[in-house]
Amino acid sequence: MQVAEERKRGRMAQLEGAGARGWEALEAAASRALREGDALAASAEWLTPKARGRRVGSSCRLTDMVAAGLGATFGAAPGTAVIALAGPEWGAAETAALATAVRRRAPLVVVVATPEETAEVARTAAGSCGAVFELVSAAEVEVVLLAVETACHVARAGQGPTLVACRPAAPAQARRRWEPREPSNDPIERYAGRLGQLGISVAEMREVARSAAGL
Amino acid sequence: VTPTTKISYAQALSEAIRMEMHRSPEVVCVASDGAAARSPITADLATAFGSERIIKLEANVRPVSVAVGMAARGMRVICEARTAQLGPEALAPLSELDPGAPGSVVLRIPDGGPEPGGLALSPIEGRLLDTPHASLVAPATPADAKGMMVGCIRASGSHCVLESEPLYASVGDVPEGSHLVQSGTATIEAWGERPKLSIVAYGAGARLADRALQTAGVDAELIDLRSLRPLDRQALTSSIGRTGKAVVIEPEGSTRVGAEVAALLMAHAFEYLDGPLTRIALAPGDEDAARLAEGIEDLARY
């Protein structure tokens, strides 16, 4: 697992799970945006307590999330959406699946965790097939939440797919240890408070992240 | 007695799919656009069922991944892919389908032997046997083609049907109406009064062995595996118990099927063996029954 490898190399000391890559906002947003009848195509790297039992796929190894999410839209009831959480590897297969979703006006929301350097690849892919594109930063949890919820609303209304590209909260060179420049405005603390408001246990989230990281 | 009609292997497959699509609205077909256009099995189904149930995907979209997503939402998906499209990454989602999922995936693989491209150089059987959970069948007759396709569509989970393209035009008696063959069952055909050799084959190899036995002059039992996973252990061990010798016929290059059969026989039929387990490899496109007959005669003399 990537986190374990990073930890072995000493680049991820004292950081945990998906949060170590600055993408925990995606988890929270996808979890929050799910409604009755929706489905989530994601691997266990993206486990969220609320999303348990709603994933397409039975274990953590499901690959090709965009195509699997596209498939799940074929059986989707009207007024429901499918969220596909994809990793940073965006290629021709993902672009083709997104193009098919656009052609079919499928109720698909693709949330792709993309480092800064590949965000443009996702933008180009969305542009080439006419999908709505949103670029957000995981440092702004509420912005990510708003983008995913809006995309889900559009999908449920039958207006086709959206690609939400999310940059990590911290740039790659800052991943050794997360030290917010402004402690009073620490997005992790804000996120923890937000989870508390939503009734989600921070301890449980942390346990899930640790479990996903094989710790 | 169930009435039968003489139809081809390809027609039997097409009839099975058509029948099941009429039977249940949850049954749909998915293939990449190019494959769907070329397929003699589903080409005429598009006009009968429309594009919502005969779904054509763009070339780069992996049909197996889409099928797994559809099955997770309760659809029974018949997915077609060429062997060259089925690398480990493309096959991986197949094992991800939850056995408790409301839908199922039947992966149809027209196999005409090696195709251009690196992946196709390794026989598809090995890659499919490396995919956890999915059953694998390889019908050799039109009747089995229909029965096994129906059986796979009605079963839950994920299944692979290895279709032999060289057999598409072969004609045989096929039961009319509902005809279902469960995976995991082999057939045994006895040649002569005192069989002294068990010939294990599947797909086109089983048909070639059948022709070879007509000229070989050897008393033998021909085991048509039909199901490569799970293997029919009872049929294999009981046949070896009667004959004492076994030969596996498979395409050139290791398909893993011979190895799986050998492992099973060494574990469960070792005490019956009077000779070495052997393998006859068929070259791509080899339809020389006389050469196979010579090999069978040599082994029978051991």
Image (spheres, rainbow, N blue to C red):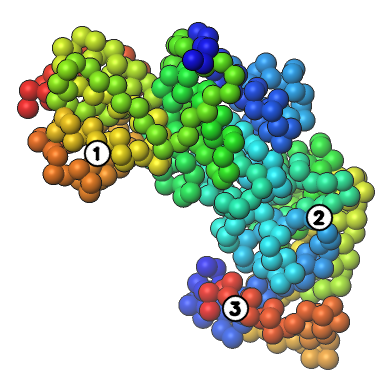
Disc 3 to disc 1, how far (Cα)? 49 Å
Where in the figure is residue A82, as x and y percent of width and height? 78, 52
- What chain does mark 1 sit on? B
Q: Mark 2: which secondary structure?
A: loop
Mark number displayed over residue B237: 1
Name the residue beneath numbered marker 3. Answer: A210
Q: Residue at x 59, y 34 (%)?
A: B153
Decide if residue A120 is in sight here.
Answer: no
Q: Residue at x 18, y 36 (%)?
A: B241
Residue B70 against residue B235 in the figure, above or below: below
Disc 2 to disc 1, how far (Cα)? 49 Å
Nearer to me, B172 or A25:
B172
The quarter holding residue A208 reads bottom right
Where in the figure is residue A145, as x and y percent of width and height? 85, 68
Residue B1 against residue B86 in the figure, above or below: above
Name the residue beneath numbered marker 2. Answer: A37
Residue B30 against residue B265 in the figure, above or below: above
- What chain does mark 2 sit on? A
